[in-house]
Amino acid sequence: MSIKIIKAGVLTTLQDGGRSGWRSMGIGSGGTMDIFAMSVANYLAGNDEGNAAIEINFPAPEILFQQDAIISLTGADFLATINERALPIWRTLLVKKDSVLKFKQPVQGTKLYLAVHGGLQAENWLGSCSTHLKVGAGGYLGRALQKDDTINFNKTHFSCNENKILSWHVSQHELDKIYLPQNNIRCIKSTEWDLMNEVSKQNIISNDFIISNQSDRMGYRLNSKPLLLQQSTELISSAVDTGTVQLLPDGNCIVLMADHQTTGGYPRIASVIKTDLPKLAQIKSGQSFNFIIVSLSEAEDALLAMQQTLHEIKNASHLNIKKYL
């Protein structure tokens, strides 16, 4: 059986961890904007992290469950309801057939993830079910979900008698380690850092950076006091990655996000550490943050700590889910 989109949202797509091994062909990894939230959504639903989940922006879709399901909602808080009953996020939820999931208003964050036990059937393109919008491949017909689209479950043997909120949840302490302090985004110096003049090197850590409303899944454009190079420089296009901070000709920056290109010719002055990409993905346009420069070893330690947290959540969630299967 399946879920059905009964009201379309804005850029609702199927995503997973992204595709790898195709950069030499000019195809980036794509995938989820908030890897922590999507991974935890899958764990809470009893899946492994590789399963496709639905990435939801606001305005959000309305979704009809045509089959009993175990689900979870993580990431942004959009005041979710099931049959008009409030639902919490970061928990495991039992949903009865013919129930309708709605989202009232955005409270915090920008990206919400819906995972279903057993996973959702999606088109695999180049080793990933993530939706590649420019190519029109992967996910659901390579596009955002629309009204009347139906997405089948990989497993349909689960049944329940009522909608129920299970007691297991991710603690606020664990979430705070990833998402707080919200306005501090850690990064490491990148290849062209030293092309900036000394004043700009100081300004990058003292400026407030505001996310522009021109931002999207390809990159977050930032407005701030202009950063300047020591002298005008032309660069050969070089490899970039999610989190690469490029300095644009107008003195503003762009942080490359999930759907970024594989190469770029603008100076790569910094790179947001992997652990803080989920936090950055959840900052709204118009909000500000500061860059904090850290060492490579600090970035590695932070990544290991996040991976340990994910491992613990996965083990605990899977033990919890077994009681209901």
Image: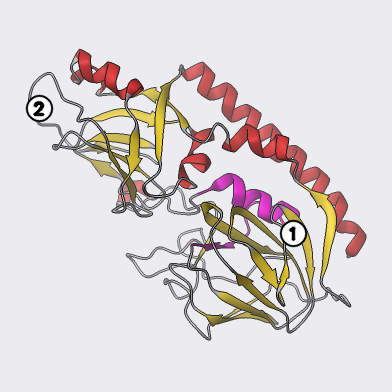
Which region is colored magenta? 34-57
**Residue 158: x, y in percent?**
83, 73
Q: Are marks 2 and 1 in contact (CB under 8 Å)?
A: no
- The residue that appears at 40% across and 63% down in the rendered structure is 132
Mark toward the start of the polypeptide (2 vs 1):
1
Kindly identify the amino acid type of the residue bearing the numbered disc 2. Answer: Thr
- The residue that appears at 77% across and 76% down in the rendered structure is 156
Q: Horizontally, is 266 left or right of 277 in the view?
A: left
The residue wearing badge 2 is: 233
Residue 191's place in the image compared with 314, above or below, is above
Q: Horizontally, is 216 left or right of 58 in the view?
A: left
Q: Secondary structure at mark 1?
A: loop
The residue wearing badge 1 is: 45
Q: Is residue 310 magenta?
A: no
**Residue 301: x, y in percent?**
59, 22
Residue 84: numbered disc:
none
Q: Is residue 50 magenta?
A: yes
- The residue that appears at 72% across and 77% down in the rendered structure is 83
**Residue 24: x, y in percent?**
32, 46
